[in-house]
Image: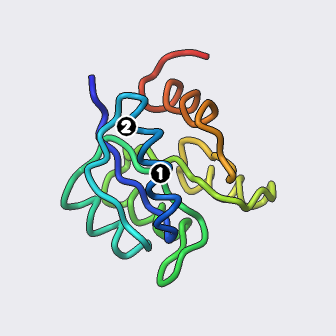
């Protein structure tokens, strides 16, 4: 079953690369957004199965966006994607409701593994 994704990152390059990986792994990217405000609007519009969400973005950052998405849909699956590797940030995202955290630069294999676990619900 194809899972529908919203890819949120202020870098068009990251949006493109992540979209390619998701599509290669059986997902359909239904929308992209460059900041948190746009992400909330696109989430309401498209109701994707999951979101990949950058942490550091203009206008509204990832944690604030995550909190709003969880208010809209408490069951939202949100995978954080960031170059910030501090334990504090990762814990903050987990407490706010993130399903997983992928570090940039990401590898296609790591993204696929997280998709299997978090989005498709398979082990390993």
Mark 1: give few (<14), some (14-19) or many (20+) Cα within 10 Å: many
Mark 2: give few (<14), some (14-19) or many (20+) Cα within 10 Å: some
Q: Residue at x 49, y 48 (%)?
A: 18
Q: Residue at x 54, y 74 (%)?
A: 61
Look at mark 1 in the image and give the residue it sits on.
52
Question: Dot 2: what SS?
Answer: helix
Colour logic? rainbow
Q: Quadrant of the N terminus?
A: top left
Q: Given the current orientation, which residue lies at the most extreme bottom position? A: 59
Question: Dot 1: what SS?
Answer: strand
Q: Residue at x 70, y 60 (%)?
A: 83
Disc on the earlier residue, 2 or 1: 2
Look at mark 2 in the image and give the residue it sits on.
23
User: Whole-percent x and y of residue 54?
Assistant: 55, 62
Would you place residue 110 above or below residue 101 in this image?
Answer: above
C-alpha distance separating marks 2 and 1: 13 Å
Q: Nearer the viewer, residue 104 or 71?
A: 104
Whether the residues at callouts 2 and 1 have beta carbons within 8 Å, the answer is no
User: Whole-percent x and y of residue 80?
Assistant: 56, 52
Q: Quadrant of the C terminus?
A: top right
Q: Is residue 68 left or right of residue 61?
A: left
Would you place residue 74 above or below residue 108 in this image?
Answer: below
Q: Given the current orientation, which residue lies at the most extreme top position? A: 123
User: Whole-percent x and y of residue 74?
Assistant: 37, 49
Q: Is residue 12 left or right of residue 111?
A: left
User: Whole-percent x and y of residue 64?
Assistant: 51, 71
Residue 73, numbered label = none
Would you place residue 25 above or below residue 14 in this image?
Answer: above
Q: Is residue 53 left or right of residue 6?
A: right
Q: Residue at x 52, y 68 (%)?
A: 11
Count how many numbered circles sit on residues in the image.
2
Would you place residue 50 above or below residue 38 in this image?
Answer: above
């Amino acid at each position: 079953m194809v899972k529908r994704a919203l890819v949120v990152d202020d870098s068009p390059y990251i949006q493109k690369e992540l979209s390619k990986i998701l599509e290669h792994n059986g997902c359909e990217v239904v929308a992209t957004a460059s900041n948190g405000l746009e992400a909330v609007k696109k989430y309401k519009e498209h109701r994707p199965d999951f979101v990949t969400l950058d942490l550091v973005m203009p206008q509204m950052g990832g944690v604030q966006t995550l909190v709003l998405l969880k208010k809209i849909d408490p069951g939202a699956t949100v995978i954080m994607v960031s170059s910030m590797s501090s334990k504090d940030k990762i814990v903050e995202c987990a407490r706010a409701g993130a399903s997983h955290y992928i570090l940039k630069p990401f590898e296609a294999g790591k993204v696929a593994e997280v998709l299997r676990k978090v989005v498709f619900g398979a082990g390993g």
